[in-house]
Image: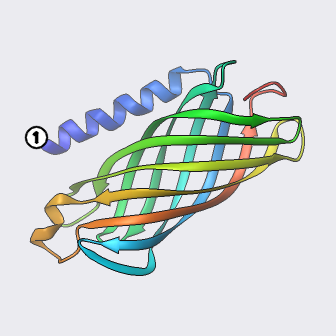
Amino acid sequence: MKLIRYGLLLAGLYAAAVQAQPSALQIRIQRLGSLRYNNVNDLGWNGWALQVEKSHSAPNGLGWLAGAEMGYTGWGSQVLAKGGVQYQLTKSSRWLSSVRAYVMPGAALFRPRPLFTYRVGGEVVGAYKLGKRFGLMAAAGIAYAACPAYDRYGSINRYVDVPLSVGVLFTASQTAR
């Protein structure tokens, strides 16, 4: 029953992203630098992920973002949906930057059944447009990730991470945010 609820939540977030008019599409590879797990300070690498994300900004700079992530972390492979808000800091003919806050519910693909997992965080994103519709982007932030039920199987079920991303940006038009 829980899996059905999580599936409906992911489907709803995806449907909202598909129906909205996007102004940018990002495809990025993310590396999760770990600062802390459970109650232990420990620097290291927690995992990696591939993200696909749509975003849209209004003329006042406020906007939304939605997407999906597939990756690997301390509790194994996982898929997450991403939803959040953003504020456009700068926009010129070539440079774009924004600050974002997001929530990512999902599932750790664990046997014998998937486990609920989530990440909550914020990031700063910068992009350099190479043409009218294509650019390169980079992002850095801080996030809290947890898989509450994983404590039945392993000793680490919470992380504080520093997500570092690089990727490509496709804008819908030259005036897109």
Relative to 72, 75 lies left or right: left
Q: Is residue 113 visible from the viewing direction of this image?
A: no
Q: Is residue 85 visible from the viewing direction of this image?
A: yes
Residue name at image x 71 percent, y 49 percent: 126
Residue name at image x 84 percent, y 28 percent: 174
Where is residue 111 shown, x and y percent of the image? Answer: 19, 67
Frontmost residue, 157 versus 153: 157
Residue 168, placed above or below residue 156: above
Frontmost residue, 170 versus 95: 95
Q: According to the image, label 1 marks what residue?
A: 1
Label 1 packing within 10 angstroms: few (<14), some (14-19), many (20+): few
Residue name at image x 17 percent, y 66 percent: 150
Residue 173, placed above or below residue 78: above
Where is residue 92 shown, x and y percent of the image? Answer: 85, 35
In what quadrant of the picture does the N terminus appear?
top left
Residue 47, quarter of the rendered image: bottom left
Count the labels in the image.
1
Residue name at image x 46 percent, y 52 percent: 69
In what quadrant of the picture does the C terminus appear?
top right
**At numbered mark 1, what does the secondary structure look like: helix, strand or loop?**
loop
Residue 117, quarter of the rendered image: bottom left
Where is residue 136 shown, x and y percent of the image? Answer: 77, 52
Where is residue 18 shown, x and y percent of the image? Answer: 52, 27
Frontmost residue, 62 versus 175: 62
Colour logic: rainbow
Residue type indicated by callout 1: Met
